[in-house]
Every structure is written in structure tokens, then in C-alpha cells.
Image (cartoon, rainbow, N blue to C red):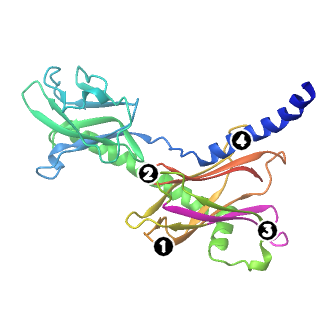
């Protein structure tokens, strides 16, 4: 009896590990929205519109006002069970969602200031970014509002300069140059060696996105030491375009990110259309070992594809 049990234990462990791996590969993963601190100038909003505030579950969203708000007159419109009670103090109102909102949810929030001014807002689900702090100005021409607008303009200029520098550095990057060559089929097919191949489906609700993936070794005689993942992505949705959000390439043992380059002809794929995504990285880890996880997220944060245990 004991010998039979010992015989079955390895098989049972192997089956369990296979089931866990399959579950990890198929489970949808959502990238957390990036926190954002922004200014809201109500006098610049279109007449009759209600400003939207992007919230995420278990994330504090603070609205700050020039005039203190009234604790008794700040209310959520019938959604109290989905949120912690709004915290009102000083010049701030803090709201925290207990659960994620769906993209269709629109939660009314009314903030009444101590001077009697009632300000309506709409709380919506965060997509790419979540509002962690919103500084609300009634009049864009006030001294404080103009000062904040100037600060925002400086921050945006700094961001654009950093982005331009990144693009310049990418233009000189070997990985980005190779990704462009692979995307444009500059290498002959006979010079590329297929290392692995997959057919993947998005694990979300419905399988509207499919991809054939080829892990290609680039020609050793021309560019030794590089590998490319070529995604041929088909958007089977009848209505929604697919847009690339971000790509992650992570060492599964250490959790560290591995440098890579991404190229697409367009970051959006229209309904019923097919597009190509190329990811290029160096072939070997610095120590010559390690398994990697490659993830592709769409624009709304949902992970569509995951390649697990890549040997690079």
C-alpha cells in the first residue's frame, strides 16, 4: 500500500503544478491605474456639464477647495453602501470606494461649500489613471488658480522635455532599431529562427482578442544576442478598438524588469482588423540564466496576454 502511495504522489504533484500554471496563464490581471494629482477649473468646464472624478477601490481620492465644504451637505447620491462615508474636514473632501466601479457606473457626488455654493461631480471608474488629489478652483482667473495653472504648465513642459529625450535615446537604441526592422519585415524570413510559438486568447469576459505569437531569434551573423516576440493580434470585437497600454518583461525569480523595446505601426487596432506588435530584448540575462514573464496590457489596464517561463 505504501509503495502505491509513493508512486502516485509525484504524479499528483505534477498534475497540481500543471493546473496552477494553467490557472495563472488564464486568469485576467488588471494593471493598477497610475495615481494623478490634477487641477480642475470649473469656470473652464462646458456649460451644463458635470466634472468627472476617477476613483479606484481602496484608494483615497481627495478634493480640495478654496472655500471649506459643509460636512452635513456633502452627499453621495444613493451609493453610500459602495463607499466609505465621505470624510469632510478643513478644505477637503475624501472619498474611498469599497469596490471597483464598472465602466458604466456614474456616482453623483454633491459638495456644498460654506458659502452655500453647491458643486456637482460624477465619480467614475478609473481606467489608466486614478485621481488621488483634485484641486478645485471655481474661477480660473483667480490669483490662486492662475498660480496653479502656471505650475501645471511648467510640469507639463518638463514632462514633454523628458518624453522628447526618451524618444531621442530610443532612436539610438539597438533594441528599438531591431524592433522596427522586424516590424517592417526587413529581415528575410529564412534568416529568422522560430524558437517558440503560441496561439493566445484574451482571458477576459468574451474572447474578443486573439494573437499568434512567434518568439524569433534574430540572425546571429548580423545582430547576435537578440530575440523578438512577434504578436499578430486580431481584434474580433464588432465595436471596440483595441489599444496597447503597456508591456512588462519581468525576471520571475527576482522580480526585476528586463530592458526591451516595443514597436507597432499603430497602437490601436480597429474592430475586425489585425495588427502586429514587436518586442525585442537581449537574448541572455546578465548571468546567463533565469525565466521571464512577458505581459501585454490593453489601454484600460486589462492584461490580454501573458507568456510565462520564457527562457531568454
Q: Could you say whether the residue bearing mark 4 is in a helix, strand or loop?
A: loop
| Category of crowding for the residue at label 2, using alpha-carbon neighbours closer than 10 angstroms: few (below 14), some (14–19), many (at least 20) | some
| Category of crowding for the residue at label 4, using alpha-carbon neighbours closer than 10 angstroms: few (below 14), some (14–19), many (at least 20) | some
> First in sequence: mark 1 or mark 3?
3
User: Toward which corner of the image does residue 263 lie, by quadrant?
Assistant: bottom right
Q: Could you say whether the residue bearing mark 2 is in a helix, strand or loop?
A: loop
Q: Is residue 7 left or right of residue 170?
A: right
Tell me whether the residue at label 1 lies in contact with that at label 2, contact meaning CB atoms closer than 8 angstroms: no
Q: Closer to us: mark 1 or mark 2? A: 1
Residue at the spot of label 3? 223
Q: Closer to us: mark 1 or mark 3? A: 1
User: Mark 1 to mark 2: distance in Å?
Assistant: 19 Å
Instruction: Find the magenta span and give its range.
Output: 208-231
Q: Could you say whether the residue bearing mark 1 is in a helix, strand or loop?
A: loop
User: Mark 3 to mark 4: distance in Å?
Assistant: 26 Å
> First in sequence: mark 3 or mark 2?
3
Question: Which residue is at a point 25% across and 30% down the rendered structure image?
Answer: 64
Tell me whether the residue at label 1 lies in contact with that at label 3, contact meaning CB atoms closer than 8 angstroms: no
| Category of crowding for the residue at label 1, using alpha-carbon neighbours closer than 10 angstroms: few (below 14), some (14–19), many (at least 20) | some
User: Mark 3 to mark 2: distance in Å?
Assistant: 35 Å
> First in sequence: mark 1 or mark 2?
1
Residue at the spot of label 1? 273
Magenta span: chief secondary structure:
strand
Residue at the spot of label 4? 252
Amino acid at each position: 500500500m505504501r509503495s502505491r502511495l509513493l508512486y502516485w504522489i509525484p504524479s499528483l504533484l505534477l498534475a497540481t503544478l500543471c493546473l496552477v500554471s494553467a490557472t495563472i496563464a488564464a486568469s485576467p490581471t488588471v494593471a493598477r491605474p497610475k495615481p494623478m494629482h490634477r487641477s480642475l477649473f470649473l469656470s473652464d468646464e462646458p456649460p451644463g456639464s458635470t466634472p468627472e472624478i476617477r476613483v479606484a477601490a481602496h484608494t483615497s481620492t481627495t478634493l480640495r477647495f478654496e472655500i471649506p465644504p459643509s460636512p452635513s451637505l456633502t452627499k453621495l447620491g444613493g451609493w453610500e453602501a459602495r463607499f466609505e462615508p465621505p470624510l469632510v474636514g478643513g478644505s477637503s473632501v475624501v472619498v474611498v470606494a469599497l469596490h471597483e466601479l464598472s465602466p458604466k457606473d456614474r456616482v453623483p457626488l454633491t459638495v456644498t461649500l460654506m458659502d452655500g455654493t453647491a458643486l456637482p461631480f460624477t465619480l467614475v471608474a478609473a481606467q489608466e489613471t486614478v485621481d488621488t488629489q483634485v484641486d478645485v478652483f471655481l474661477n480660473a482667473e483667480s490669483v490662486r488658480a492662475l498660480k496653479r495653472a502656471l505650475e501645471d504648465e511648467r510640469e507639463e513642459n518638463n514632462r514633454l522635455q523628458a518624453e522628447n529625450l526618451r524618444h531621442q535615446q530610443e532612436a539610438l537604441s539597438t533594441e528599438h532599431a531591431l524592433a522596427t526592422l522586424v516590424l517592417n519585415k526587413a529581415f528575410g524570413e529564412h534568416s529568422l529562427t522560430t524558437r517558440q510559438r503560441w496561439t493566445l486568447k484574451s482571458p477576459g469576459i468574451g474572447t474578443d482578442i486573439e494573437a499568434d505569437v512567434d518568439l524569433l531569434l534574430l540572425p546571429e551573423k548580423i545582430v547576435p544576442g537578440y530575440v523578438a516576440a512577434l504578436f499578430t493580434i486580431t481584434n474580433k470585437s464588432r465595436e471596440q478598438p483595441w489599444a496597447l497600454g503597456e508591456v512588462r518583461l519581468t525576471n520571475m525569480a527576482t522580480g526585476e524588469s528586463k530592458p526591451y523595446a516595443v514597436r507597432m505601426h499603430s497602437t490601436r487596432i480597429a474592430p475586425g482588423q489585425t495588427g502586429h506588435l514587436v518586442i525585442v530584448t537581449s537574448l541572455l540575462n546578465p548571468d546567463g540564466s533565469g525565466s521571464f514573464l512577458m505581459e501585454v496590457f490593453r489601454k484600460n489596464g486589462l492584461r490580454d496576454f501573458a507568456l510565462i517561463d520564457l527562457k531568454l
